[in-house]
Image (cartoon, rainbow, N blue to C red):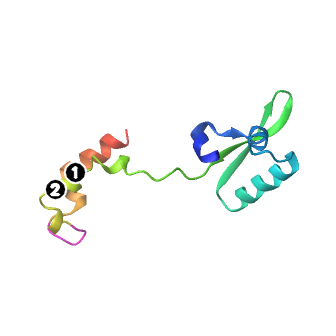
């Protein structure tokens, strides 16, 4: 549920209601998840009460971001490498793709 909430996060109080645990149990769970580096907690005032908004620290893995990478269909892929004549550092198509993907 926390991962699905994405960048907007989920209120800790809402999460505990959803999974049907007490506030105390929910607080302990979130502290453990934070301690393991899986989530981050930020205090937030909601309906006149202090709670935490929980955010996932890691997003689900997806190959969508690399599907358009020119390396996948490049004719020189087999001879491309860090110490080769053809390198990712000098590849115009790769450089252009990086710039377009990160703008």
Counting from the top left corner in percent of width and height, residue 72 is at 23, 55
Q: Secondary structure at mark 2?
A: loop
Residue at 53% across, 50% down: 59
Report whether 54 appears left or right of 62. Answer: right
Q: Residue furthest bottom?
A: 83
Q: Residue furthest front?
A: 20
* Figure check: 31 above or below 49: below
Q: Secondary structure at mark 1?
A: helix
Q: Residues within 10 Å of mark 1 (few under 14, many from 20)?
A: some
Report whether 7 appears left or right of 81. Answer: right
Which quadrant would residue 77 be assigned to in this image? bottom left
Report the magenta residues as a range.
81-85
Q: Are marks 2 and 1 in contact (CB under 8 Å)?
A: yes
Counting from the top left corner in percent of width and height, residue 75 is at 12, 58
Report whether 15 appears left or right of 80. Answer: right
Counting from the top left corner in percent of width and height, residue 30 is at 75, 52
Q: Residue furthest top?
A: 47
* Figure check: 79 above or below 18: below
Q: Where, quadrant-wise, is the N terminus in this rendering?
A: top right
Q: Residues within 10 Å of mark 2 (few under 14, many from 20)?
A: few
Q: Where, quadrant-wise, is the C terminus in this rendering?
A: top left
* Figure check: 14 above or below 73: above
Q: Which residue is mark 2?
A: 74
Q: CA distance from mark 2 to mark 1?
A: 6 Å
Report whether 59 appears left or right of 53. Answer: left
Residue at 86% across, 28% down: 48
* Figure check: 33 above or below 1: below
Q: Which residue is mark 1?
A: 70
Secondary structure character of the magenta stretch overall: loop
């Amino acid at each position: 549920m926390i991962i699905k909430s994405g960048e907007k996060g989920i209120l800790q109080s809402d999460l505990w209601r959803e999974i049907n645990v007490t506030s105390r149990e929910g607080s302990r769970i979130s502290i453990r998840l934070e301690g393991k580096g899986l989530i981050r907690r930020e205090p937030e005032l909601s309906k006149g009460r202090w709670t935490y908004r929980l955010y996932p620290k890691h997003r689900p893995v997806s190959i969508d971001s690399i599907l358009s990478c020119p390396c996948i269909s490049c004719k020189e892929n087999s001879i491309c490498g860090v110490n080769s004549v053809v390198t990712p550092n000098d590849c115009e198509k790769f450089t252009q793709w990086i710039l377009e993907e990160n703008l």
